[in-house]
Image: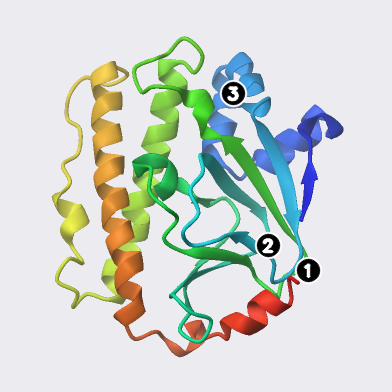
Amino acid sequence: MEVHPLHRYEQSSLYNLLSSIPFYKAVKQRDPWQYDLLMSYSRIIEYRPGEVLLEQGQNDQWLYFLLRGQLAVIVGSGDDERKVVNYITPGEVFGDLAVLIDHERTATVVADPNCKSVMVFGTDFQVFGDLDDVRKISLSTKLEYYRNMVHNLRWKLEVYRMSYPDQSFASNHRKVKLYTGQKDTLEELKSLDEQARALARLLVIWNLEFDRLSISPREKLDYSSLVALGE
């Protein structure tokens, strides 16, 4: 693992790296000051093939976005029982569940050994402060983040529903109500936060359930070989 402080990057190069992440791209275009503030709480990290990024059971407040490469999401309690249940591709967020519901990480994330390099962008979510505190992170920026977050969570849950439609809770995310009130308000932000937390709890249930689900052949990878490459 190699951590790169953002001051090493030219602004144009950094912006190009983040262009695949809708949240940062939107903030940069709408409010450069807010963008610069977020950058001061962020960093870029490079990982070797097979190196562990996040370990199941950890608890922290960092939010991550994949810039380059591919990540494997692994669940299970022991090396012999661990299995890949999903992959993360550039532009996707991860680590969001622990941040949203203050929960231990329910999966281990590993740099795909088939990628020459993996580059990740991380932001310390503590800069967001309390939900209704908009003195540092503005209401517009928080709305932008939570809209993207809810969209991503619903998308992940829908993918799981289509992959495992026979699960009793497969469609529960569709019962989480959408916001129908006035846009660009604190009320919308509170609704988005409630949606995100409800959806995050459903993802935790999925991650725990994956220990008992049958996995497709493509996903049956040897966890021990993934970790060994990163040692």
- x, y percent for residue 191: 23, 30
Report the residue at 50% width, 85% height from top.
218
Q: Earlier in the sequence, mark 1 or mark 3?
A: 3
The answer to the question of whether label 2 and label 1 lie on touching residues, with beta carbons closer than 8 A, is yes
- x, y percent for residue 38: 61, 26
Q: Is residue 18 left or right of residue 166?
A: right
**In the picture, which quadrant includes the C terminus?**
bottom right
Q: Which residue is mark 1?
A: 116
Report the residue at 55% width, 19% height from top.
30
Mark 2: amino acid: Gly
Mark 1: amino acid: Lys
Q: Which residue is mark 2?
A: 69
Q: Secondary structure at mark 1?
A: loop
Q: Which residue is mark 3?
A: 29
* Mark in front: 1 vs 3: 1
For the view shown, which residue lies furthest in the bottom direction?
217
Q: Nearer the viewer, residue 33 or 220?
A: 220
Tell me: residue 125, above or below residue 101.
above
Report the residue at 79% width, 28% height from top.
11
Q: Earlier in the sequence, mark 2 or mark 1?
A: 2
Report the residue at 42% width, 52% height from top.
104
Mark 3: amino acid: Gln
Gap in angstroms between the C-alphas marked 3 and 2: 26 Å
Gap in angstroms between the C-alphas marked 2 and 1: 8 Å
Tell me: residue 92, above or below residue 81.
above
